[in-house]
Every structure is written in C-alpha cells, then in structure tokens.
Image (cartoon, coloured by chain):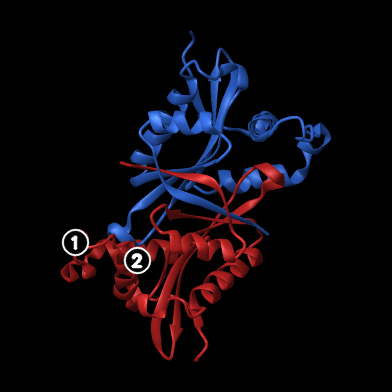
Chain colours: A red, B blue
Amino acid sequence: MPTLHFRDATPDDIAIMLELSHAGDARGPDTPPLERSTLSDPRYRAAFDEIAADTNHRLIVAERGGEVVGSLQISVVPGLPHFGMKRGMLENVHIRADQRGNGLGSEMVLWAVEQCRAAGCGMVQLTSNKLRLDAHRFYRKLGFEASHEGFKLRL
Amino acid sequence: MPTLHFRDATPDDIAIMLELSHAGDARGPDTPPLERSTLSDPRYRAAFDEIAADTNHRLIVAERGGEVVGSLQISVVPGLPHFGMKRGMLENVHIRADQRGNGLGSEMVLWAVEQCRAAGCGMVQLTSNKLRLDAHRFYRKLGFEASHEGFKLRL
C-alpha cells in the first residue's frame, strides 16, 4: 500500500476538504446533499487565507497515490495553567469513506499528534460526535481518553 | 448583590487565575495543594504575554465588589466548513467555590458567549470533565448540548 504523504493544504484543496467534511458529517439519509455550487463561495477562500496566515493553525491534507484521501485542521491554543501549557486541537478530522479501516486514519492522527508535540503542546484534544461510536473506538485505540463531555452551543 | 464586572486580565491577575484554576480542577483529598512558590514562575508571565498579544485569545476575570471571583479564557478558532465558521472556545472556566449557585457563573458564561458572537463565531464549544455533573447541568441550562465526546491525550 502506498504510504501517506502529508502536506499543508493549498487553495486548490478547498473543494476536496469540504467534500470530505460534508461526507464525514453526514448523518444518514436525512443529510442534505453537498451543494457543489457553494464550493466556490468566496468566504471559503477568505477563511483559508486567514488560517494560512496564522502559524497557530494548519489545514493538512493526506495524499495517497497522488489523491487526497484525508484532511484535518491542527490548531495550537495557548493557555495559562500548568506553566502555560499549550493545547493542540484537532478539528475536522476526515478520512475518505473507502479508506477507513486500513490504518490510514491512525497514521494521519498520529502524525498530527507529533506536529502538536513539535509545536510545544502538552496535550492534544478533540471532540467527536456521540453518534460516531466507530470514531470513539478509533481514538481510544490511539491512546485518547474520553474524559470530558463536549458541549456545543450554536449561535 | 453587586453585579459582575468583566475585564481583560492583567499580569497582576496571574496568581488569582491560577488559584481559581487549581481549586476548580481539584478532585478531592488526593489533589496535591497549590504550590504557591510556583506562581511566580516566569513561564506564567510568558504565557500571559503570548495570549495578550494575540487578539484571538482573551483571558477574562470577573470582579464583584472589587474582588476577582471568576475567570475564563476565550479563544476564537477559525475553520473552513460552513462558509468558514469560526468557533469560540471557552477554556479554564472557573468561579470561586463560595460564589457558585448564585447566578454569577451563568452571567459570566453568557457574557463570554456574547463576546464570541461579537467576534463572528457561529458556535461556542467547551469540554467539561465527566466527573463534574454539576457543571454539566449548569451548561445544559445555558443552552449548551453535550453532543460530543471530549477526547484528551496527554503528551
């Protein structure tokens, strides 16, 4: 199996990242389909540029055989306690559905954990929808502990 | 009851913020006491300065009658999906033990939510230790949904 290659995303990756994100967030037949016409909305490019301009945030794509098969965002968040311990936050962790279960997801997340360690983080954290039991097993296997409740409030 | 006054923390608030954080994280008699000699560790001031220098992060203290009775960190994290929706993250949310149950915590968190809204966030999120059932009730009452598992990995 070709190994994964990780790189920072470019604006050309915006559409594929949004496709992976939409597919990963899908919750059965009631999920509305991805509206492709929206992928070129200028707000996406503006958000991409804002993330790319801040060294505390990285959009990463994982390529295999020249194809993007996964993506995630790594954010480094400073903090005061524990002698100023930084936290690495993983957001929008997605692997293409046909690539799950073959170890690529583990490779990608463990790579991201190492990026957080290299950035000086003392902890890596993420939240995973309570419906995604498969994802919970996956993170537990990688050493993550589901020690917290993840609360969200939509504005 | 005097109302709360919210302000960005100054370096003079580092010790009280660490005290609130230590008391809030305490988990019964096995918790080691706060080592006061460490409060002046220069890493705390360095972390404070880093947070203060980045407009995406704010350390907030809540004062009542001239005394600091609560603190929290607000971090605004950019993202790509949902037209570049930003997330407000609340970290280290602490109210002094003798001030709980009187509405000050709600006032502080709702104030922080409004700061996130004003910063353009489409969501506010936080994680709360699974042991803190009182905190979970508190956040649910404020409209937060415990929709996610909060995974942590110590490095």
Q: Position of residue A123 (x, y in %)?
A: 63, 55
Q: Quadrant of residue B98?
A: top right
Q: Position of residue B144 (x, y in %)?
A: 38, 37
Q: Residue at x 78, y 42 (%)?
A: B41
Instruction: Say which of A134 and B9 sits in front.
Output: A134
Q: Position of residue A80 (x, y in %)?
A: 64, 43
Q: Left or right of A113: which side holds A41?
A: left
Label 1 Cα neighbours within 10 Å, binned few <14 / some 14-19 / many ≥20: few
Residue type beneath disc 1: Pro
Instruction: Say which of B52 and B120 sits in front.
Output: B120
Residue type beneath disc 2: Gly
Identify whether B129 is placed above or below A94.
Answer: above
Q: Position of residue B26 (x, y in %)?
A: 69, 33
Q: Outermost residue, top direction?
A: B1
Which chain does tag 2 point to?
A: A
Residue at the spot of label 1: A32
